[in-house]
Amino acid sequence: MSFQTESYAHTAKTIIANLEKRNMLGYYCENAREAQELIHNLIPVNATVTWGGSETLVETGIMETLKESGYILLDRKAAKTPEESRKLYGQIVTADYFLTGTNAITLDGELINVDGVGNRVACLITGPQHVLVVAGMNKIAVTEEDGIRRARNMAAPPNSIRVGAHTPCSKTGVCADCQSPDCICCQTVITRRSRVKDRITVILIGESYGF
C-alpha cells in the first residue's frame, strides 16, 4: 500500500462515517476491480438496472461488467422515438437499481451534482429503489462551495466536449456562468441526506476516474 493509498483509505473512512449520519451507506475499494466485484455482490441477479451518463462507470469497467452479469438493463439510449423514450423513462424511474457517478462529494458526506437535462439527478433524488454512486477519490471536495466550483470548472468543460455541447467552457475550459442553449449546468443538486434510509450507497475508489 502506497502512502497515497493509505491516505485515501483514511479519508474514505471519514466520509463513510459522515454518509451514515446522512442515512446513506458507504464503501471504499482500493481499485476498480474491487468496485466491480462489490457492485456484482450488491445487485441481485434478474434485478432491473439502469444508469446515468458517467465516464466513471465506463472507465472503471463497471458498464461492461453490468452487461455481462445477467441483469435486466434499461438503457435510455435504446429509444428510437420520443414516444419510446417517454415509455422507457417510465420504466427507468421504477428500476431496482440506478448507477451514477457524482461531480463531487464533500468530506462531510454531501453529494454535489450539476446536470443539464436533469434525468441523472432526478433518479438520484427519487424513483429507483436503490442508487449506487461510484466516485474516484479525485471527486473529493472540502465544502459545498468547493464541490460546485469543481463541477462547473473541472467537470463541465470536458463533459461539454464529450456530449458535443457548444458552450463557452468547451472552448475555454473555464465556466462562464453561461445561458447557452447547449448549457449542461441547468440543475444544481446537493444531496445532504437520504430521506429513505440506505437507499443511496456511495462507492469510493482509491484511484482517479471521470471528470
Image (cartoon, grey):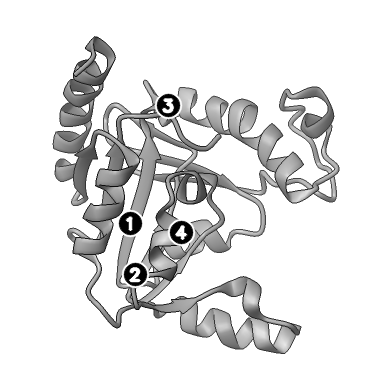
Q: Residues within 10 Å of mark 1 (few under 14, many from 20)?
A: many
Residue labelled with disc 3: 138
Q: Along the polypeptide, which appears first: circle 2 or circle 3?
A: 2
Are discs 4 and 3 less than 8 Å apart at CB?
Answer: no
Q: How far is mark 4 from mark 2, CA to CA?
A: 13 Å
Q: Position of residue 77 (x, y in %)?
A: 64, 72
Amino acid type, mark 1: Leu
Q: Nearer the viewer, residue 108 or 61?
A: 61
Residue labelled with disc 1: 132
Are discs 2 and 3 less than 8 Å apart at CB?
Answer: no
Note whether residue 196 is visible. Answer: no
Amino acid type, mark 2: Tyr
Residue labelled with disc 2: 97
State the residue at coordinates (21%, 38%): 28
Note whether residue 117 is visible. Answer: yes
Q: How far is mark 4 from mark 3, CA to CA?
A: 20 Å
State the residue at coordinates (43%, 45%): 60
Q: Secondary structure at mark 1?
A: strand
Eyeballing the image, is 70 above or below 10? below
Residue labelled with disc 4: 63
The N terminus lies in quadrant: top left
Q: Along the polypeptide, which appears first: circle 4 or circle 1?
A: 4
Q: Along the polypeptide, which appears first: circle 4 or circle 3?
A: 4
In the image, 47: left or right of 169?
Answer: left
In the image, 203: left or right of 128?
Answer: left
Q: Nearer the viewer, residue 173 or 176?
A: 173
Q: Secondary structure at mark 3?
A: helix
Q: How far is mark 3 from mark 1, CA to CA?
A: 18 Å
